[in-house]
Image (cartoon, grey):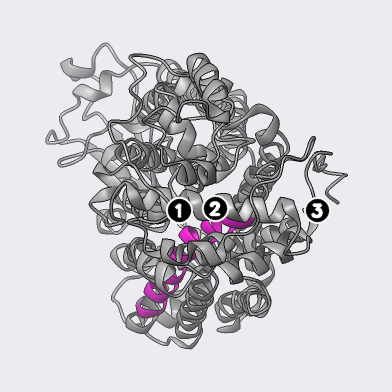
Amino acid sequence: MAIAMGWQKPDNVAGSSAPAIMVGLFVASGGLLFGYDTGCWDPSTILMFDFDDATTAADSCDMHDEAITTYISKERKAISPEEVQEGNATRAIYEPPTRNSTRFSDYRHKLTISLYRAINGILAMAEFKEQFGKHTNCHDEKGALDICTKDSSIIVAILSAGTALGALLAAPTGDSLGRRKTLLVAVGIFCLGAIFQVCANNIDLLLVGRFFAGVGVGLISVLVPLYQSEMAPKWIRGTLVCAYQLSITIGLLSASVVNILASKLNNSSAYRIPLGLQIVPAIILTGGLLLLPETPRFLVKKGLHTEAGLSLSRLRRLDITHPALVDELQEMIANHQYELTLGPDSYKDIFIGSPHLGRRTFTGCGLQMLQQLTGINFIMYYSTTFFDGAGVESPYTKSLIINVINVVSTVPGLLVIERWGRRKLLMIGALGMAGCQLLMASFDTATGQSYEKASQTILITFCAINIFFFAASWGPVVWVVTSEIYPLKVRAKAMSVSTASNWLLNFGIAYSAPFLVGSGPGNASFGPKIFFIWGAFCILAVFFVWCNVYETSKISLEQIDEMYERVNHAWNSKSFEPSWSFQQMLNDGWSPSAQPPAGHELQTTTTASSADTTLGDGDASSITVNQNNNNSSSPSNNNNDQNKGPPPMAMANVDFSY
């Protein structure tokens, strides 16, 4: 399979990468839990604006005039204004008072405000609405029990609250219990939430289940990329972490298929079966995690060097005494000891610590927030409304089409991330999304939101292309970069903070979007013009990547520390060539901010390489650490002699830091 996908291990890499690839792909299945849970509910509430004429004259219409107001339901039947306020209507048509009114004498038009309550998934099932609607006073246009808008909103939004909390909890638990054991805890919490949802007969218990499921998803969203990056060989690390996003999209697609099949049932099984099935991948993931090794870098962080060597031996399929494995393990240990000499590993240090932790945290949080500000979730929901004019009426079918596009579009990102690099893929993706969204906004503005067949085709096409650019770039690559750029001592803390920023902004956008596109008092009335906002953020994302995102492909996690020390500007990181050995640095008593001792074998290499890659005044770090083997501030250095293997060996054509 690896060869078929173009994943060929470089000839100068010792051992086998097959175990690490299989482990990375298996752990990526944690994304199925998040994707499937989200796909089961699949809600959206979109407000659209339609002018019969290509004019904005209706903006001047005073609704306090004695206008003739007609409310029309999905079945084109007149309904009451109260039902419109409850969100059950899909169209409200306002006509001017009279044809001879001086205000409208120059315009023959009517303003159509379309309120699309595009509820898909479980929330659209009659059996679900009958079970949980009896606890409310809400009814649909046919008089049947329904879930009130406020209740459906909280059912959806509480997952984001849980995910944000789970992401923040991932750091303390992941650093104490370990990456693997914390993943087991996360899956257990998710299963508990799923059980509560299946057994719920009232909204309160359902909300408890949604919250617990969210906590589990939040933990998984930090720990899966973290686990993958810490155990993967550098030549395929990006592809393996991208597989996490692919699993999310497969989970969304699977939920769409299950919802279509379950919607044909006529009892509570219609929604209980989809909710219960999410436990199946969780059980499979649990069984696998019981057999998988802990990441070698976490074991190094805990001072368990022998165990780290055994873990690395399983992942690289090398004997624990093999020179390549010994050298890689020594470099992990020395790099961590060096990191500890630069300062503590507190939450405060992820913003002000060295080497350049503030810059890295700003990059990670910025990427996670911009991933949401590309407007992808809004696009995913908004695009379903365009299928109405294309003859696709079933909400389940709309969701299925979008999710198929999402899955297929994620695959190219996996294939090119190692060849193109992180920076190039992110910038191309942002430019592509910006073009699509600005074209959609301009088209809607110029045509007055026309619903002719040609208009529908253009809008559907742009939405599909936008989803393609996101799924192939910002969807997976953001997880890759944020799992790579942080040093080991604060990796879990920094990843949890950056991931939590993603979930919090996700909640904020979901909450504010209806007010941004809505019309009337208290709303911004942007309508389709909101695509200008998302497009502007995509353009901002291009500049953000250019200025802040370092190219981390093809180098080890330890060498990323060296890159941040030596390369002052992100746009020069592509040409970075690692030349330091942290093991030799500690042995010889010098740090990257100083020069190697006179006559040292790295003196010439370091000086020449730094001249090629470092810009500015060359002061990449203001911290100089003098350390020797007998006196170290690292807690784990007391055992350095007994855990340190034989000295590094010079072996031609063998890349030891894979």
Q: Is residue 230 magenta?
A: yes
Instruction: Say what secondary structure mark 2 lies in.
Output: helix
Magenta segment: 208-231
Instruction: Say what secondary structure mark 1 lies in.
Output: helix
Comparing 373 with 166, the one in front is 166
Residues under numbered marks 1 and 2 in contact, where contact means CB atoms less than 8 Å apart:
yes
Instruction: Say what secondary structure mark 3 lies in.
Output: loop
Name, please, the residue furthest toward the top. Answer: 106
Q: Identify residue type, mark 1.
A: His
Which quadrant of the view contains residue 219?
bottom left
Comparing 407 with 240, the one in front is 240
Residue of label 3:
15
> Would you say residue 488 is visible in this rendering?
yes
Residue shown at 46%/59% (left/top)?
222
Q: Identify residue type, mark 3.
A: Gly
Residue 299 position in % (x across, y down): 52, 67
Residue of label 2:
332
**Distance from Cα at disc 3 to Cα at disc 2:** 18 Å
